Amino acid sequence: MKWRSRTLEEIADMICGNGDNAPFKYRSSSHITRFFRDVDTDYVHDGSTRNYWVAGVLQELLEMPHANAQTPSNVFCQVISTLMDPADAFNEDSKREGALKLLNATLKREGFESFYAEDGQCYLRHIGTSTIASPYANPHRPWSKIEVERRDQLTAFLEKSSEDDLIEELLLPLFRQLGFHRITAAGHKDKALEYGKDIWMKYTLPTLHVLYFGIQVKKGKLDSSGVTKGSQANVAEIHNQVTMMLGHEIFDPELNRRVLVDHAFIVAGGEITKAARNWIGNKLDQAKRSQILFMDREDIVNLYVVSSLAVPTGKTEPDSGFDETIPF
């Protein structure tokens, strides 16, 4: 990823605190070194002109490994978060509205904007796709108090939501945030057109190759038990639907041709038991086993929390059993 020199120099001026009455505190050579140490790097200012040196470091951080063109490297995102720390407010209040305005005027040139989320941290968002680049998007890290509360709220939502609520209010925003595109929900109005897919979507690799994903969604627990109880689904049924999904073509309007699904997600609003995973693993041969991916409630909740998406409220009505097309 490469940004304009002008953009990097303006951000470097913010880090250095250059300019009269700037809403950024002044940082000397030693404090610049400390700043980059705070973002877990080992850069040491060499005594040269501060803003040019910082601009060069920022370009190096942008060239670090990153997921796609819409998400800069984690370290660069952490630089922005540290720069906009509310505790470092200078010549303004703790909301840092002046600093945010200046930073966004610069970031807009590269197609990004910054914003403060519910956790009080500053994040980068790609304007064109609304993808949020987070330096903390690791679902296995320790949780903050606010994040624990959001996990509890999401769990409560999953307990009461219908399958359509799960798809429309939680999964669609989550997969968009994770970088998937052309996300299409089949809906449940016409089962003849579904062929085992609740959602299909595309993901573009850095090489510009495209992978197609189909998603089979179940609201409750997924088990290998031979008896279906309540919202609990049998894994054999899911296996049949996934087989249909992988064997049936979908029409991609962007390419104006039909394509096959490369991978299938099995997503459960409840737990996918170990027995269910083992059953499907044993049913699939070695060639197809890599095509099946699993996500249960724990995976969904963890990814949703670290993606800084708003907690859905939902209608919290029980699933009526009637089919309904999900709007876009």
Image (spheres, rainbow, N blue to C red):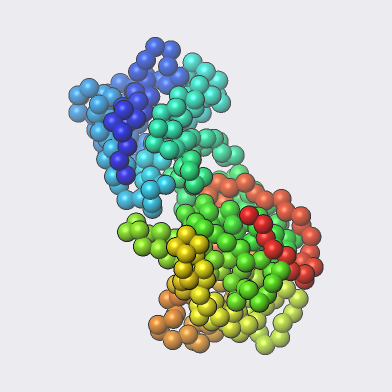
Q: Nearer the viewer, residue 97 or 291?
A: 291
Identify the residue at horizontal 32%, vertical 31% (top origin): 8
> Which residue reaches farthest front?
256
Q: Position of residue 122 (x, y in %)?
A: 49, 36
Identify the residue at horizontal 45%, vertical 19% (top origin): 23
Q: Answer with the quarter of the image where residue 322 lies.
A: bottom right
Identify the residue at horizontal 53%, vertical 54% (top origin): 176
Above or below residue 176? Residue 228 is: below
Identify the residue at horizontal 76%, vertical 55% (top origin): 315
167 left or right of 84 in image:
right
263 left or right of 318 in image:
left
Q: Quadrant of the N terminus?
A: top left
Q: Answer with the quarter of the image where residue 54 lies.
A: top left
Is any atom of residue 293 visible in this view?
Answer: no
Is any atom of residue 247 visible in this view?
Answer: yes
> Which residue reaches farthest top?
20
Above or below residue 200? Residue 10 is: above
Q: Position of residue 108 (x, y in %)?
A: 44, 33
Q: Answer with the quarter of the image where residue 219 lies.
A: bottom right
The mark total stands at 0
Q: Position of residue 141 (x, y in %)?
A: 48, 53
Q: Quadrant of the C terminus?
A: bottom right
Above or below residue 278? Residue 317 is: above
Q: Position of residue 224 (x, y in %)?
A: 62, 83
